[in-house]
Image (spheres, rainbow, N blue to C red):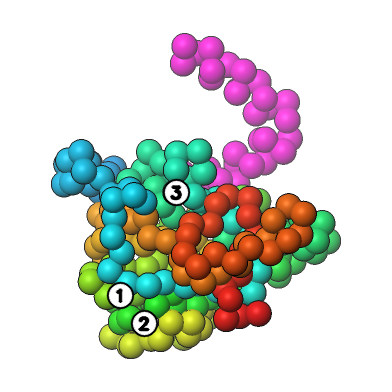
Amino acid sequence: MLLAWFVPWLALLFLDRRELYGTLITLPTWLSPVVWATSLAQMVGETLNRLRPGKNLPTPATYQPKGTYRLPFQGWWWVGNGGPDPETSHSWELLGQRFAYDFLIRDEEGKTHRGSGRRPEDYYAFGAPVCAPADGVVVAVQNRHRDCPWPGLLDPLAWSILGNYVLIRHEGGEYSLLAHLKRGSVRVRPGQWVRAGEVVGECGNSGHSTEPHLHFQFLDRPNAFLGLSLPIPFSGFLRKKEDGALERVPLGFPVRGEEVAPWDSL
């Protein structure tokens, strides 16, 4: 079976220049010791997460959030990935990312970038402010990781899958993670108190990001690999329907394919 998969892939690799180029440019990434160490950390975290809660994994129906949270941005963003069920989940089989989200910005034509989209600066989300979803204390930050200059490909020089990020501890020991931020844009430091809606950085293309976007999720521990993803709804946002009508959502989960915006940012 492995041979049946490998032979067609090898033929495609040498016959399709784009496939060949994509493989060559990302090969250093997959051979990187840091990436392998990260993958090992994810495997360990997944194993521990599956042993820790047993069969009582948190679900939207059973988990009671300790705090109230708003969307982590201003204005309209598109849910590129994420939702509260297996059909819409960011990564349902990964307990550490089960209820994570990828947020992007699109134009009226549904495009996430201007022109050809060859540069990070072409993307509407690049440089857009990202905000704390609730009051809390900053636990950890990263601000030195470069933004991948080639949207569409994983950065072969990436040394962290998160890239630049901000990790915040909220009420009751819930943590929020905002990742793939723009290098040099993080404006908070560990130990700093932040307010809901306060800008903590800007959206970027750092880490394992194929185009500028915000990776966001809630965790029950201050560690992206050991923490369990929590199904926490957002309060006070607008959902744009297919016919253009706006729906006010007092409390709920954004779902993949929707455009959403916080009430207080419009």
Spot occupied by residue 154 in the image (x, y as percentages of width and height): 56, 51
Q: For the magenta stretch, what is the residue range? A: 1-30
Label the magenta part by its dominant secondary structure. helix
In depth, the one of 73 and 17 nearer the eye is: 73
Marking on residue 170: 1
Residue at 25% over, 45% down: 57
**92 and 9: which one is in front?**
92
* Circles 1 and 3: CB atoms closer than 8 Å: no
Question: Does the segment drawn in magenta span residue 244?
Answer: no
The kind of residue on which mark 1 rests is His
Residue sitting at x 48%, y 85%: 198
Residue plotted at (18% across, 46% down): 53
In the picture, measured across the screen, residue 23 lies left or right of residue 186, that is right
Percent from the top left, x then y, of residue 184?
52, 80
Structural crowding at the residue carrying mark 1, measured as other residues with C-alpha within 10 Å and reported as few (<14), some (14–19) or many (≥20)? many
From the image, tell me which residue sits under label 2. 135
Question: Mark 3 and 2 residues: CB-CB less than 8 Å, in contact?
Answer: no
Question: Are the residues at dot 2 and dot 1 in contact (C-beta closer than 8 Å)?
Answer: yes
Q: Is residue 18 left or right of residue 187?
A: right
How many residues crowd around disc 2 within 10 Å: few (fewer than 14), some, or many (20 or more)?
some
Residue type beneath disc 2 = Asp
Image coords of residue 126 (percent x, y) = 64, 70
The residue pinned by badge 3 equals 84
**How many numbered marks are there?**
3
Q: Nearer the viewer, mark 1 or mark 3?
A: 3
